[in-house]
Image (spheres, rainbow, N blue to C red):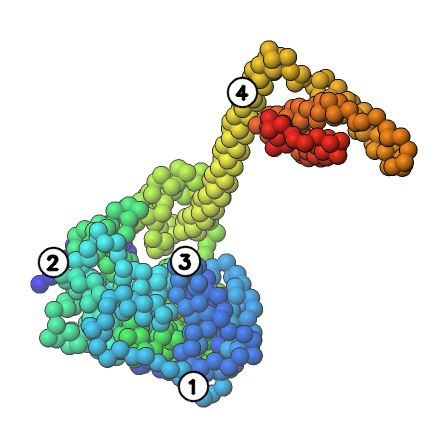
Amino acid sequence: MTQLWDFAGGIHPAENKHQSTSRPIRQAGTPERLVLPLQQHIGEPAEAIVAEGERVLKGQRIAEVPNGMGVPVHAPTSGTVESIARLPVPHPSGMDDWCITLIPDGEDQWCQRHPVLDYRKLERDEVLEAIRNAGISGLGGAGFPTNIKLRPPKDRKVSTLILNGAECEPYITADDMTMRERSDEIIAGLKIMAWILRPERCVIAIEDNKPEAAAAMKKAAEGTQIEVVVVPTKYPSGGEKQLIQILTGMEVPSGGIPADIGVMCQNVGTAIAVARAILEGEPLIRRVVTITGEAVTEPGNFEALLGTPIDYLLSRAGLQEAKLHRLVLGGPMMGYTLNTPDIPVVKTSNCVIAATAQELPDPEPEQACIRCGQCSEACPMELLPQQLFWYAKAGEFEKAEHLNLFDCIECGICSYVCPSSIPLVQYYRFAKGEIRVQQAEQLKADRARERFEARQARLEREQQEKELRRKERAKAAAEAQEKKKAEAEQATAKGEAVDEKAAKAALVQEALARKKAGAATASETQTTDAENSSPAPDIPALEKQLTQAKSKLETMQSMLEDAKAQQADNVDKLERAVAKNHERVKRAEEALAEAGADTIPATQSTE
C-alpha cells in the first residue's frame, strides 16, 4: 500500500458533486458562432494569422505566438472568420480582449492531420514540438503551456510524475466523469508524458469520494507500472503542492516549482489532450465542462468546442432564468462571478455554476477582524492570513511579500472560515497585482537607467577619443613647428630667405621680371629685320628670375607640407599656390630658353 502523508490546514466543505454525475458526458453540439480569445494560457497572447472573411478548416491554426512563451489557437470547426475584435472574455475583471469570431458552416471539415503511429521512433524534442503545435496548455489550473512544463531544466531530473485526478473543489465533476468514461485515453496520454520525462514513478491520484473513477483508472492501468492512489477527501488536496506533499511527503520550497524536488503534476484532461494530439493529430479544440447549480434542470458535463458561449451551454442544461441569482465560473471556492453569460469556453474553463439565491447567497458585509485565528489554522500553506490582510489593506506590499504572499494558492479557505466575512483572497489578489505592477515599472526604470548609463559611457568614451586625437594633432603640429624652425635656422645660416617676407619679395621680383620680359618680347616682334636690332636680352637677369621663382616654389612646398602635418585649414589654398608657382617656374624657363640660353643648370630642376 502506498504511504500517504497529510498537509496542514484544509477544510471539508459541502461537495455538491452528485448533481452533475447522474448523466454521462454529453456532446454540446455546435453553436451559431464560436468566440476564440487569443490568450487562453499563461504567457504572451497569440496573434491572428487569418483575416476577416477567410474560410478555415477544423483544426486549422488561426492564431500563433511568434515570440515568447505561448501556444497557438485552432479552429474548433470549419467555417468563416466573421471578425477579429475586442469582446468579453473569462476574467475576474470582466475585461475585453482580442477574439476571433468564427461562424461554423456545418460541414465540420478537417484540415490535414498528422498522427504519429509510433512516437517512440521520434526525438523527444519532436514530440514536444507536436504538443506545442497542438496548442495544449494545462486544463486543470492556470493554463501553463504543456510543452514547456514537460521540458524541465536539465539539472532537475523528474523522478515522480503525478496525474492529478483529485478534483477537490465542490461542484466540479469534469475530471471525475472523464476518468470514468475515458480512462484509456488518459493512460495513453500519461504514457506519452512518461516517455518524454522518464520518471521512476507514475502516480494517478484520486480522492476517495470518486470510487467509480478510481475503479475505471485501475482497470485501465492493469499491466502497467502506473500506480492509482486513492487519497483522503480534503480541500484543497487537489492543489499541486498539497497533492505532492500527500504522495511524497516532500514540500515544494517557497518560491520554487515541483521540478525543484523532482516532481511534476499534470491534469487528467491535459493527458487526454496530449494523447489526441500525438496519436490522432487533433489539436486542443474541445474540453469537458461541468454545468451545474440549482438554477438548471439538467445539470451535467458537456464536451464543448472551445469558443462555445456559456449561455449556449446553460440553455442545453435547462437554465431557469427566474431562479438564477449568480453565475460562477469555476468552483465556489476559487471561481469568480460572471457579469454576463455571453463569454466563451476557453482551455481552462472547467465549470459553470448557475446558483440560486439560497444556494450561493450574496456575501455578508465585511466586518472588523476579531483576531480569532481560524484563517491561520485552516491555511494549507501555513501562512499568516491575518497579517497579510493588514499589510495588503494598508498598502504595505513589501511587508506582505516578505511574509510569502506569493506562496498563497488563493484556495479561498481563509475567506470561507472567516466569521467577519472578510474577502481575504480578494485582498491578496489585489496586493499581488499591485506588486506585479510595481515590479514591471521597476523593470522599465532599470532598463531606462541602463540605457542612460550606456549613453553616458558612450559620450564619455567619444570625448576621450576626441581629446586624444586633439593631443595627437597638437603633438604633430609642435613637431612640424620644430622641424620648420630648424629648417629656417639652416636657411638663415646659408643666407637664403625662407621666411614669409622673403617669399613675398620673391613674388614681387618675379612679377616685375615677367612684365619686363613681356615688354621686351613685344618690342622685338615690332622690329623688322631691316631695322637696327634691340639690345640682346639680359640672360643673367632671366636666370636670376628663374632662380627666385624656384626658391619661392620650394618655400611654398615647405609651407604646404607643414600645413598637412598640422591638419591646418589652409591646405587647399597652399596647394593652389604651389600649382601657380609651378606655372611661374615653367614660364621663366621658357623665357630664358627664348632668350638664347643653351642649357639650364641641373641644380635648378622644376621638380
* Callouts 2 and 3 close, C-beta under 8 Å: no
Estimate the spatial distance between the alpha carbons at disc 3 and disc 1, rounded to whole Å: 32 Å
Q: Which residue carries the number 2 mark?
A: 3
Q: Earlier in the sequence, mark 4 or mark 3?
A: 3
Q: Secondary structure at mark 2?
A: loop
Kindly report which numbered mark, 2 or 4, lies closer to the viewer in this rendering.
4
Of circles 2 and 3, the one toward us is 3
Q: Residue furthest bottom?
A: 107
Percent coordinates x, y for residue 223 in the rendering: 10, 75
Q: Quadrant of residue 14?
A: bottom left
Residue 410 sits above or below residue 212 on the image = above
Give the number of the disc on residue 479: 4
* Distance between mark 2 and mark 4 Cα atoms: 91 Å
Q: What amino acid type is highlighted by mark number 1? A: Asp
Please name the residue that numbered disc 1 is placed on: 108
Q: Quadrant of residue 60?
A: bottom left
Q: Residue at x 11, y 61 (%)?
A: 2
* Of labels 4 and 3, the one closer to you: 4
